[in-house]
């Protein structure tokens, strides 16, 4: 009975965490470059149950031997193992803003992806698909959250104005004659990146290599466009309802266990 409480509770916790993940996906459905998370559910190891018993041997003295017949296996619950981002390409939307730049995947190996390279005040390099850029007060090209966009050499990009052009190969030319090449990094297995929030990812083992010059990687940059979130809102709503129904079903089982325990505590063994 008590094992049933733990099994049901684990199911409720797993569905709660899945609902939180889906809610975050839905909240970022309009965030440029956002990659939807997918849940990986797993069960705890099953337990093999055996019954302790005795078998009487028909001898003169009535010898008894202990036996352990197998009853069967029992599941010990489920949990959400991890949330894995889906790095599929989002829709490309035209904005006609020079500071908006979209990364468009071409022929990439499976699980691979390309990212803009950015950095903060600490100098740590991070990666993002959100090309909603702007210029700060000093003319540096930054993300909407204030991180500096880096060129292919890892340097900040400074411009005299927001009147600049970017080619499909990432070459940037400013109105004042400034030139740079927007830094684009390549992740051979994007699932190994660590998601940090705000559309940012960090590499587990050092920095990612620059994507330019690799013949196996095909991509392009489009100025005046933004990559949209790849969240499927219809499916996400359906999955949220499914998770809610599963949580509700586990809740009803928990209530049934609770009523049974109440009956045992208050009625079974009562002296009449």
Image: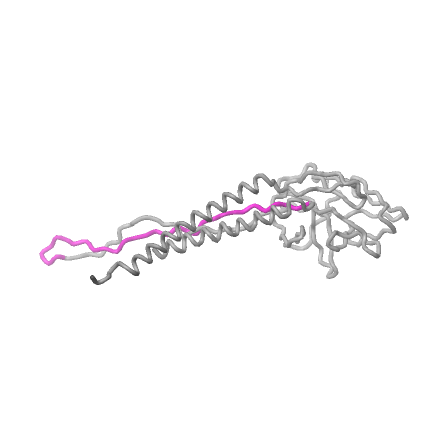
Give the camera-side residue of 209 and 244. Answer: 244
Question: Considering the image in quadrants, where does the C terminus appear?
Answer: bottom left
Residue at 54% across, 41% down: 238
Give the camera-side residue of 1 and 40. Answer: 1
In the picture, measured across the screen, residue 60 lies left or right of residue 149, that is left
Find out whether residue 56 is within the magenta segment.
Answer: yes
Residue 231, how many percent across, how many down? 62, 42
Stretch of the chain drawn in magenta: 33-62
In the picture, measured across the screen, residue 115 lies left or right of residue 18, that is right
Question: Considering the image in quadrants, where does the N terminus appear?
Answer: bottom left
Residue 4, how many percent across, how many down? 37, 53
Find out whether residue 180 is within the magenta segment.
Answer: no
**Residue 16 in view, yes or no:** yes
**Residue 215 in view, yes or no:** no
Give the camera-side residue of 158 and 96. Answer: 96
Number of numbered discs visible in the structure rendering: 0
In the picture, measured across the screen, residue 203 lies left or right of residue 57, that is right
Determine which quarter of the picture holds residue 112. top right
Residue at 34% across, 51% down: 48
Give the camera-side residue of 271 and 22. Answer: 271
Residue 156, how many percent across, how many down? 80, 54
């Amino acid at each position: 009975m008590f094992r049933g409480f733990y099994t049901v509770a684990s199911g409720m916790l797993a569905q709660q965490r899945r609902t939180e993940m889906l809610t975050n996906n839905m909240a970022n459905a309009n965030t440029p470059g956002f990659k939807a998370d997918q849940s990986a559910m797993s069960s705890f190891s099953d337990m093999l149950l055996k019954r302790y018993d005795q078998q009487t041997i028909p001898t003169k003295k009535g010898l008894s031997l202990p036996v352990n017949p197998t009853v069967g296996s029992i599941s010990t619950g489920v949990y959400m193992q991890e949330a894995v981002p889906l790095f599929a390409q989002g829709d490309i939307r035209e904005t006609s803003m020079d500071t908006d730049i979209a990364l468009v995947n071409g022929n990439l190996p499976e699980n691979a992806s390309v990212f803009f390279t950015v950095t903060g005040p600490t100098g740590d390099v991070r990666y993002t698909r959100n090309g909603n850029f702007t210029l700060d007060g000093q003319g540096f090209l930054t993300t909407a959250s204030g991180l500096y966009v880096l060129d292919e050499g890892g340097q900040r990009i400074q411009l005299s104005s927001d009147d600049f052009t970017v080619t499909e190969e990432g070459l940037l030319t400013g109105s004042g004659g400034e030139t740079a090449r927007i830094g684009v990094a390549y992740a051979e297995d994007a699932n190994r990146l660590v998601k940090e929030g705000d559309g940012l990812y960090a590499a587990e083992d050092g920095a990612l290599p620059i994507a330019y010059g690799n013949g196996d990687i095909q991509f392009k940059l489009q100025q005046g466009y933004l990559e949209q979130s790849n969240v499927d809102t219809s499916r996400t709503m359906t999955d949220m309802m499914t998770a809610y129904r599963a949580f509700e079903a586990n809740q009803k089982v928990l209530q049934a266990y609770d009523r049974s325990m109440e009956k045992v505590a208050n009625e079974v063994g009562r002296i009449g």
